Image (spheres, rainbow, N blue to C red):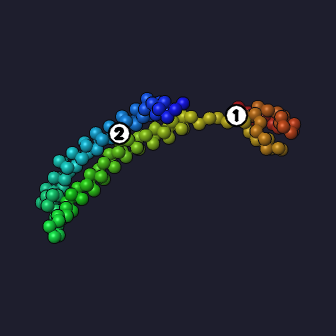
Amino acid sequence: MGVYEDFKKFLISGNLVSMAVAFVVGLAIVALITALVTDIINPLIGSAGHVDFKDLGRLNINGSVLLGGALLGAVINFAVLMAVVFFAIAYPYQKYQERKAAREKKVPTTRECPSCFNAISLKATRCGFCTSTVTPVAA
């Protein structure tokens, strides 16, 4: 197979499509949270402190303007975004994986021979490796 066929297979694979959908959904979530923080949370904080975030921390140094309020708004935006991603996506997924792993725990079907330490069936009365007699485990 050549490079072209490998690249074509990669583009058509389900992983790439899933990743693209996740990327688009992630961008939509970021736009939504940014709008929430910029249009609702920042004005509420600003009205409580009687200050406008755009004017907060404005410094003029040799004609350059440093915007501390914009940085503070970005930090608030980041904190809210991380909280939403954690509580809406990461935490529920982690709990789902834990429940799934708990359901999939398998009951052991073998045990160790006390004489030779090889794996033997739970129902065995004699070890197939060293032929020593062992007591069967009740199911």
Give residue 72's position: percent from left, percent from top.
24, 59
The percent coordinates of residue 9 (x first, y second) are 47, 30
Seen at 27% across and 56% down, the residue is 75
Residue underneath mark 2: 23
Q: Position of residue 23 (x, y in %)?
A: 35, 39
Mark 1: give few (<14), some (14-19) or many (20+) Cα within 10 Å. few
| Mark 2 touches mark 1? (CB < 8 Å) | no
Relative to 95, does residue 61 appear above or below in the rendering?
Answer: below
Return the residue at label 1. 109
Q: Is residue 2 above or below residue 113?
A: above
Residue drawn at point x = 15 percent, y = 58 percent: 54
Pair 2/1: label in front: 2
**Residue 48 appearing in the image:** no
Residue with the most extreme bottom position: 62
Q: Position of residue 127 (x, y in %)?
A: 83, 36
Q: Is residue 120 above or below residue 82?
A: above
Three-letter amino acid code at the position of disc 1 = Thr
User: Residue 81 bears which disc, if any?
Assistant: none
The local secondary structure at tag 1 comes to loop
Name the side, left or right, on which 54 lies relative to 134.
left
**Quarter of the rendering containing residue 118:** top right
Amino acid residing under circle 2:
Phe
- Residue 50 or residue 60, whichever sits in front: 60
- Which residue shows up at 20% across the image and 49% down it? 38
